[in-house]
Amino acid sequence: MDESQAREAARGDQPMTLLDHIGELRRRIIIILVILVLGMVLGLVLADPVYKFMLNQEPVKGMKFYAFSLWDGIGMYMKFALVIALIFALPTAAYQLWAFVKPALGSKEQRAALLFVPFVLIMFLVGLAFSYYVVFPMAFNFTTDVAKHLNLEENYGVIQYFTFLFNILIPISLLFELPIVIMFLTKLRIVNPLRLKKMRRLAYFLLIIVGIIVTPPDFISDALVAIPLILLYELSVMLSGVVYKKQLQADRAWEEEYGT
């Protein structure tokens, strides 16, 4: 029995007040922040081997970077620490969210919603891989080709390079959580596939804007990013439909047994 269940048992059948809910939410936010901080500490430890690994990968293998400020090295370590911390913080946040809404869910819904937690990490890692191995090389090659076309000497600062890199990696990786978020919201009956289909044009527009922002200003690169994001949205609609169909079946079964 966890702490929230113990508190419920101590109160008996007495419902939680608004202050109880606020206190519970605050406690779970604190847990997420603690995991984020601990993840950043671990990230600082792992930053050096990850940094060396990335410098030996294309398209920057053999390239020399420069520090233009005394804080550049520290800034680089902090950027790595943040990304590594997100790997631990996102599943934790998903679990804490599930634990917060758990009392409002039935036993079957609780088990089904809990299955979303590991997929939060999986989709984030898939997003990292896609953005690093597909999107980033396109953006990097485009910008360096422009510099060469203008006969510019390429001397890149380490903090500028990794800022450019993480500005691509983090937004795309977080967008890969979209199917999980949509399924969870459908499970809570906040959204449904019908509503998502009505929002399709707006969603497409926003995803295309994101694709344009994180990629070089050419149509091919924009399309190579925007199309997977749109497919992610359609996957979200499809998965929402699966969850929604099961909810309707459960509602019909309940009505047949207990009446309307």
Image: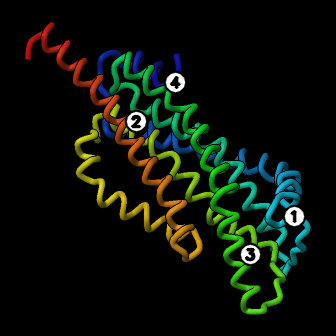
In the structure shown, which secondary structural element does the residue marked by tag 4 occupy?
helix
Q: Which residue is mark 2?
A: 184
Residue type (three-letter) at the residue carrying disc 1: Lys
Q: Nearer the viewer, mark 1 or mark 4?
A: 1
- On screen, residue 114 versus residue 131, left or right, reads left
Q: CA distance from mark 1 to mark 3?
A: 17 Å
In the structure shown, which secondary structural element does the residue marked by tag 2 occupy?
helix
Going from the N terminus, do you reach mark 2 or mark 1 first?
A: 1
Do callouts 1 and 3 mark residues in contact (Cβ within 8 Å)?
A: no
Q: Nearer the viewer, mark 4 or mark 2?
A: 2
- On screen, residue 174 versus residue 208, left or right, reads right
Residue at 58% over, 37% down: 91
Going from the N terminus, do you reach mark 4 or mark 3 first?
A: 4
Residue type (three-letter) at the residue carrying disc 3: Gln
Residue at 59% over, 74% down: 216
Q: CA distance from mark 2 to mark 1?
A: 41 Å
Residue type (three-letter) at the residue carrying disc 2: Phe
Going from the N terminus, do you reach mark 3 or mark 2 first?
A: 3
Q: What x and y, as percent, mark residue 46? A: 83, 49
On the rendered image, what quadrant is the C terminus found in?
top left
Do callouts 3 and 2 mark residues in contact (Cβ within 8 Å)?
A: no
Q: Which residue is mark 3?
A: 160
Dot 4: within a 10 Å radius of its alpha carbon, few (fewer than 14), some, or many (20 or more) residues?
A: few
Q: Which residue is mark 4?
A: 3
Residue at 20% over, 20% down: 251
- On screen, residue 71 versus residue 10, left or right, reads right
Q: Which residue is mark 1?
A: 61
Seen as rendered, the residue at the extreme bottom is: 151
Do callouts 4 and 2 mark residues in contact (Cβ within 8 Å)?
A: no
Q: Nearer the viewer, mark 2 or mark 1?
A: 1
Residue type (three-letter) at the residue carrying disc 4: Glu
Please say whether residue 20 is visible from this viewpoint.
Answer: no
